[in-house]
Image (cartoon, rainbow, N blue to C red):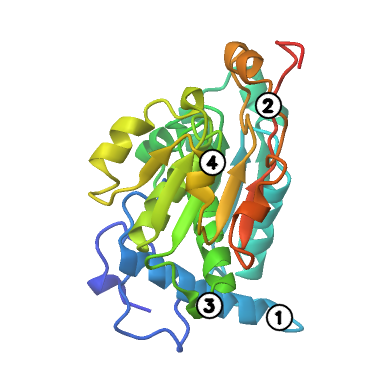
Amino acid sequence: MSTGADRPEGAFPVPITASVPASAAPWAHRHLLDVDTLTRSEIELVMKTTDEMRDILARPIPKVPALRGMAVTILFYEASTRTRVSFEVAAKNLSADVVNITASASSVSKGESLVDTIRTIEALGADMIVMRHSVSGAPYLAAEVFGGSILNGGDGWHAHPSQALLDLFTMRSRLPGGSLEGRKVVILGDVLHSRVARSNVWTLTAMGADLWICGPSTLMRGYEAWASRGAAGRRFTLTADVDAALRDADPEGADGVGAAPVDARVCGALRADEGAPPGLLPRCRGDAPGTHERGRGDCSRCGG
């Protein structure tokens, strides 16, 4: 681990096990708000550290003292099971002291502002906050007023950095050679309302994947300009042709319509079922691993 003297100001130390090369890029980020600021070498560092943690979790006692003495507060403004519990288990496996706060059961329900909530949590000794919020950009506001580190567990339709890193780790684990360099990766479905898809664009292009995004034009608004400009100069392909997108694809991710509540006009026009379209997987390569975020659309407003 690097010493305080050679870390950039505000950077949070990440414990690296001995098997990770000393030449690996240091972790210079105080917060994890999105993956758009991560370099390829920094993403590789996360992947290598995750490989080590996978081995540790297979032990009879799956704990390391990396965050011993650190106070981690999990603050969720949206209902969640997998993400919230995953962060809690991870923090405890790293020996952190964990506090869970559900917004609906806190002073937020009485009108307390986000800034006041963050300041209260800091005054009570939190070193790190794992935060999920329905408003895009909320973790960025929290990062401005909090003296510790903010980890974004999903904000509105904007970003879900931890899920994007997990998707990348899963793909690398399943693909021969563990590399996405030059591999055709497809994200299929509702990318307009998907914070996961937006973060996936950054991680997958950073690792050299040939990224294709496919869906109805109504659910890809705004992506045209992004595709032409690229993600930090890295291009990806946008298409409404499912067959062209899936031809010779390696891993594919299917986002069901409405990972967040969908506008009634969009839902009414598409009348789409949740989940991957029938016959989707047979169009891909037979050995192609896949990830699937099952849709959770709210169709009550359009009678669906």
- Badge 4: how crowded within 10 Å, few (<14), some, or many (20+)? some
| Residue 75: % across, % down | 60, 41
Instruction: Say if mark 1 contacts mark 4, CB within 8 Å.
Output: no
Circle 3 sits on which residue? 176
Q: Tell me the element at label 4.
A: helix
Tell me the amino acid under the disc marked 3.
Answer: Pro
Residue 248 vertical position relative to residue 57 in the rendered view, above or below = above
In terms of depth relative to the viewer, which is nearer, 241 or 206?
241
Tell me which amino acid carries mark 4. Answer: Val
In the foreground, 213 or 14: 213
User: On the picture, is 291 further left or further right than 114?
Assistant: right
- Residue at 59%, 56% in the rendered image: 284
Q: Which residue is mark 2?
A: 272
- Horizontally, residue 33 falls left or right of residue 102, namely left
Residue at image point 71% right, 80% down: 58
Callout in the foreground (1, 4): 4
Do callouts 1 and 2 mark residues in contact (Cβ within 8 Å)?
no
**Pointers 3 and 1 in contact (CB under 8 A)?**
no
Q: Secondary structure at mark 2?
A: loop
Residue 250 in view in this figure: yes
Task: Reply above or below: 153 against 176.
Answer: above
Q: CA distance from mark 2 to mark 4?
A: 15 Å
Of badges 3 and 1, nearer the viewer stands 3
Give, as a three-letter code, the residue at label 1: Ala
- The quarter of the rendered structure image containing the C terminus is top right
**Decide: marks 2, 3 in contact (CB < 8 A)?**
no
Disc with the residue nearer the chain's start (2 vs 3): 3
- The amino acid type found where label 2 is placed reads Ala
Alpha carbons under labels 3 and 4: distance apart: 25 Å
Q: What is the distance, in whole Å, between disc 1 and disc 4 at their CAs? A: 39 Å
